[in-house]
Amino acid sequence: MRAGILRSPSPLPGFGLSFGIMMAVLSVVVLLPIGALLGRGLMIGAADLWDMVNSRRIWSALTLSFRAALIASLFNLVFGLMLAWVLVRYRFWGRRFVDAAVDLPFALPTAVAGIALTALYAPSGVFGQALAPLGIRVAYTETGIWMALIFIGLPFVVRTVQPVIEELDREVEEASATLGAPRSYTLRRVVLPTLTPALLTGFALALARSVGEYGSVIFIAGNIPNLTEIAPLLIVIRLEEYNYDAAAAIGIAMLVISFAMLLGINVIQIWSRRRIGLV
């Protein structure tokens, strides 16, 4: 009876072996590194950790990293939904090419993406020169950081939402239209509630990916302290200075903030699943 509490009925045997392998891999890949970081923090002490983190430069970097990640993820949430909807519901010339291009940020090294974006949006670049007369600067500003994070985070939303859109029953939408509901009402009350759990999952994945992004951002950000310097870069700087305690302090601060944000997203996701009857 006690074993039944730990697992759901399954037609396939091997729960003990599968569970053991899963926990071993999870421990090595996730739990042990996080535990080592937290253990380093315990050795340093809460007071010393706060002294290491409590500086204008570090708070500026943390605020910039999470603000830019949040803005980029919100943009990807909207645009990724639109892109996934178009790829699933419409047939047009070049659709397969667009669908394949969505995965490009997965395969492209982030440093290459950063160099390419910088070459395009720098003051001497093609887009940078076109935007300069309008008084718009992208490279070496926070806007450039948004561009890089949008680039690397978009596929997470598209690939998470796309299968759910493919499984949507069009008869429900047609029934809503038959009853006289406008398209905006059908989208708001019929389509979006079904897509909300997948949208939140994609948003959480894009946010988590963007917070820790380094390679594509450092080239286009300019890395100006208190302006365009991100927290991951500060960690690298502290490591190059052999100041491992300070690097650990910044890492723990990012871990705590990320955990709080993801916890809030998961709570909203559970609520949305219960609301539409999936839990």
Image: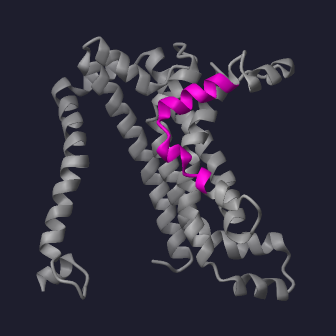
Which quadrant of the rendered structure holds the C terminus? bottom left
Magenta residue check for 163: no
Which quadrant of the rendered structure holds the N terminus? bottom left
Which residue is at a point 65% across and 83% down the rendered structure image? 169
The front one of 226 and 81 is 81
Q: Position of residue 49 (x, y in %)?
A: 28, 23
The answer to whether residue 64 is seen in the rendering is: no
In the picture provided, is 143 more to the left or to the right than 104? right
In the picture provided, is 277 more to the left or to the right than 8? right
In the picture provided, is 80 more to the left or to the right than 263? right
Which residue is at a point 62% across and 34% down the rendered structure image? 146
The front one of 106 and 183 is 106
The answer to whether residue 167 is seen in the rendering is: yes
Task: Give the farthest residue toward the top.
Answer: 241
Magenta residue check for 119: yes
Residue 270 vertical placement versus 83 (above, below):
below
The front one of 184 and 144 is 144
Residue 271 vertical placement versus 176 (above, below):
above
Which residue is at a point 68% across and 64% down the rendered structure image? 87
- The quadrant where residue 53 appears: top left
- The quadrant where residue 122 appears: top right
The front one of 80 and 263 is 80
Which residue is at a point 36% across and 23% down the rendered structure image? 235
From the image, give the main secondary structure of the stretch colored magenta: helix
In the picture provided, is 264 more to the left or to the right than 276? left
Q: Position of residue 34 (x, y in %)?
A: 25, 41
Q: Which region of the structure is painted magenta?
A: 100-120
Q: Position of residue 136 (x, y in %)?
A: 78, 23
